[in-house]
Amino acid sequence: MIQIDEKSMNNMIQDAASAFPHECCGFFFGGKGQVTEVMVISNKRTENKERRFLMDPLDFLKAEEYAEDQQLDLMGIYHSHPNHPSIPSEFDRVHAWPNLSYIIISVLQGQFDNIQSWRLNEDRQFEEEIISPIKTHTHA
Amino acid sequence: MRIDNLKKKLFHLLKPIHMPSIKIPTPLRKYTNNDAEIKVSAQNVQEALIDLTRQYPDIKNHLLEEDHSLKGFVRLYIGSDDIEGKDGLLTSVNENDRINIIPAIAGGNLNTQES
């Protein structure tokens, strides 16, 4: 199971909707299985951005430095599937790294449809991990 | 002849052995006992990787192919410079260099290997 606070969930969904019809991408951070922060990253693909995303390697360095500075864990990577389900493609699987969560957001005609999280098992196959949304409490 | 051989051996022994470090990316720290930075004994990037995989054999499958070439989805930077713009795996490393192992991050909903 992966817990995601309300603000982080909204940030990822908003990024996915804003990027439509292109794929968005980014990192998420937190600790003890709970996502508390999101870093939006620009999709560096120059073509076919509706079906693919690519990050600049230096963005990965930036994300790791941020995690260290904030004493957070880099928990995983999110991206969107415009007009497709939130299920990893074979291309996603082949490019995935172990020990990270992969959140996929499905956006249909610009509207949020679904969000799911996936993780590679020992056989390099994706298994779904249940998302548990966490309400952000605000004090009056 | 013997003196020449002795000179060669001495030269090899006296070559400075550098101890640069390798920054391990988060997804691979499980294979280095969660250590983020590993000191290695090397004069170039290739030797650094060999020393890393000698110290932590479980990381090898995630970095190198069976023929010891670098896996396709792995990038190596010295600081913020891609070694592909230098001498590749033969790029020299110095004492204070930090080699960054960077996973290439890509994906998408198209269900083929076409990039």
Image (tube, coloured by chain):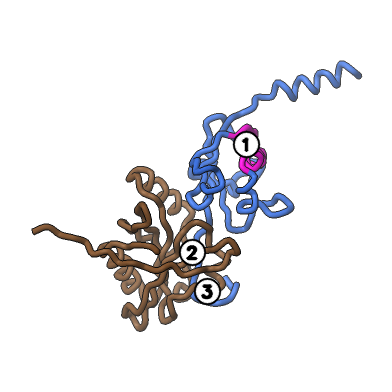
Chain colours: A brown, B blue
Mark 3 element type: loop
Name the amino acid type tagged 1: Ser
Name the amino acid type tagged 3: Ser
The residue at which mark 3 appears reads as A89
* Label 1 packing within 10 angstroms: few (<14), some (14-19), many (20+): some
Of tags 3 and 1, which is closer to the observer?
3
Q: Is residue A53 left or right of residue B65?
A: left
Q: Gap between marks 2 and 1, in whole Å?
A: 37 Å
- Which residue lies most toward the top here? B3
The residue at which mark 1 appears reads as B92
- The residue under the point 48% across, 44% down is B80
Q: Are marks 2 and 1 on the same chain?
A: no
- The residue under the point 53% across, 58% down is A98
Q: Gap between marks 2 and 3, in whole Å?
A: 13 Å
Please give the label number shown on residue A4: none
Name the amino acid type tagged 2: Arg
Q: Gap between marks 3 and 1, in whole Å?
A: 39 Å
Q: Is residue B58 left or right of residue A18?
A: right
Stretch in magenta: B40-56
The residue at which mark 2 appears reads as A119
Q: Are marks 3 and 1 on the same chain?
A: no
- The image shows residue A108 at horizontal and vertical percentages of 37, 82
Would residue B40 be visible to someone looking at this image? yes
- The image shows residue A63 at horizontal and vertical percentages of 40, 51
